Amino acid sequence: MDPPQPDARTRNLDVPDVRTRILDAAEGIVQARGVSGLTLDATARDAGASKGGLLYHFASKEALIDAMLRRLAAHIEADYEATVAAQAPGAGRVARAMLHWTFGEGELACGERHDRAGAVFLASFHHDPALLDPIRAVFERFQRDLESDGLPPGAAEAISLAGDGLFMHRLFRLVTHPPERMARMRAALETLLETR
């Protein structure tokens, strides 16, 4: 007897929709070849979509880059909110979240997703710096939250900036920090959380 076949409504739950496949393909192209390699034809081909299907969702290269950045901004904000929510309430909650985010493990650990994000940042800045406005809005929110985090002035911001610096080291492959150095840096930054 043949196994039961999945219902048509549930058959393709693991298959990303066309829009998602297009955005994923565009990020992959930008990461591998930079913004100059990002064309609508290449994106459609890599996404397994028709050019007409791509144009239905994104009428231009600018619209495609804008959508990548808006999706990235939404992911960053969701990660941020989840990380803050996981911290104990009280002074330094946002800074502790930033510290955990910077030195995180599991889903928060730096990896392919962060490399793609960095590539999208750079490509967007190179193509049209104004396209980074959705990301700027998210980072402005982070700064407002850090300023009202209950730590002495500058402490929370220093933790955030250290995380940004480590991200830049990774993005530009400037320095590879071994685990023992990362542990030392984290311990030093944690002392800022103890300053009340």
Image (tube, rainbow, N blue to C red):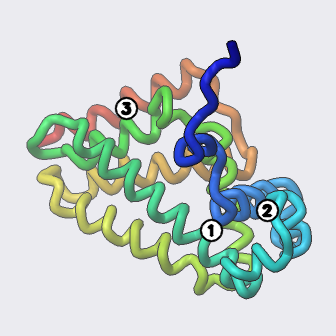
Mark 2 → mark 1, Cα distance in angstroms: 11 Å
Please report contact status of discs 1 and 3: CB closer than 8 Å, yes or no: no
Labels 2 and 1: the sequence-earlier one: 2
Q: Residue at x 74, y 77 (%)?
A: 126
Residue of label 1: 68
Residue pointed to by mark 3? 188
Front-lying residue, 83 or 63:
63
Look at label 3 and name its amino acid: Ala
Where does label 2 land, which residue?
30
Secondary structure of the residue carrying tag 2 is: helix
Cα distance, mark 1 to mark 3?
A: 35 Å
Q: Residue 141: horizontal and vertical position, in percent?
A: 31, 68
Q: In the visual, does 35 lie left or right of 85? A: right
Identified at 84% across, 64% down, the residue is 34
Residue nearer the viewer, 2 or 64: 2
The reply to whether discs 2 and 1 touch (Cβ–Cβ < 8 Å) is yes
Q: Is residue 73 above or below residue 96?
A: below
Q: Looking at the image, which residue is at 59% across and 46% down?
A: 8
Q: Of the residues shown, which amino acid type is indicated by label 1?
A: Met
- Which x, y percent locates residue 171? 68, 50
Task: Work out whether residue 105 or residue 38 is closer to the camera in this orientation and state it.
Answer: 38
User: Where's the C terminus, which quadrant?
Assistant: top left
User: Which image quarter holds the N terminus?
Assistant: top right
